[in-house]
Amino acid sequence: MYAVVGCTDCEHLWLLKDARASKTATCPRCGRTYQTKKLRRFAEDEDREAVRQARSALLAKRGGNSEAFAETAHVAEMEREIDERGAAVDDDEYLTGSGLDADEIEAAGEQAETGTGRSSGNRLDVIRAALRECDDPTDDDVAAYAAERGVPADQARKLLTKLSRRGDVTESRGTYRLL
């Protein structure tokens, strides 16, 4: 048995499986826990698709879109049509339609995943790497190391100060050490 139930705090509607069998249910939006016997059931059915459709109708009514919903196919039917026709918009088509270059975005994603490019990792990681790899690193050493990896020297000094204030780095007589 499936049921459409609602949260009294955030007014979220969700599907609950075996509404009579479980003792408690938690709202997926706000996290409030309810005793299932006290939850209001807006619709109940043995068929999950029927309950999904009932929830969709309730959401449409809530949003003032009942007429548009009545003209729309059943949720399960729309999913079937998309699967059969392949009518779903793929990522490249969506990006191109939005005025973006899909190939450029793919290259940027690969660069971010593999760490290739001018800087390896994020800027804080570059500063930490400088502290590990340089012998008795000064702020000039860290700035030079970072500049070679695409982090501007002035930004490297600011990040070094930030790490020091956070307690991730210690400085003694002009030499920095990663903690």
Image (cartoon, grey):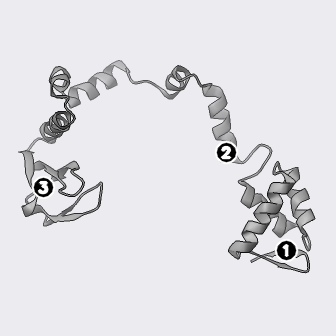
Real-space CA distance between mark 2 and mark 1, rounded to the nearest whole angstrom:
28 Å
Query: Residue 10 versus residue 80: which sits nearer the camera?
Result: 10
Q: CA distance from mark 3 to mark 2?
A: 44 Å
**In the picture, residue 134 is in which quadrant?**
bottom right
Q: To which residue does mark 1 refer? A: 176
Tell me the residue that label 3 is attached to: 18
Residue that appears at 37% across and 20% down: 87
Under mark 3, the amino acid is Asp
Is residue 21 visible in the rendered structure shown here? no
Residues at badges 2 and 1 in contact (C-beta under 8 Å)?
A: no
Identified by mark 1, the residue type is Tyr
Residue 6 placed where, x, y %? 16, 52
Identify the element where label 2 is drawn.
helix
Q: CA distance from mark 1 to mark 3?
A: 60 Å
What's the residue type where badge 2 is placed? Answer: Ala
Quick one: 167 or 115, which is closer to the camera?
A: 167
**Residue 148, above or below 73:** below
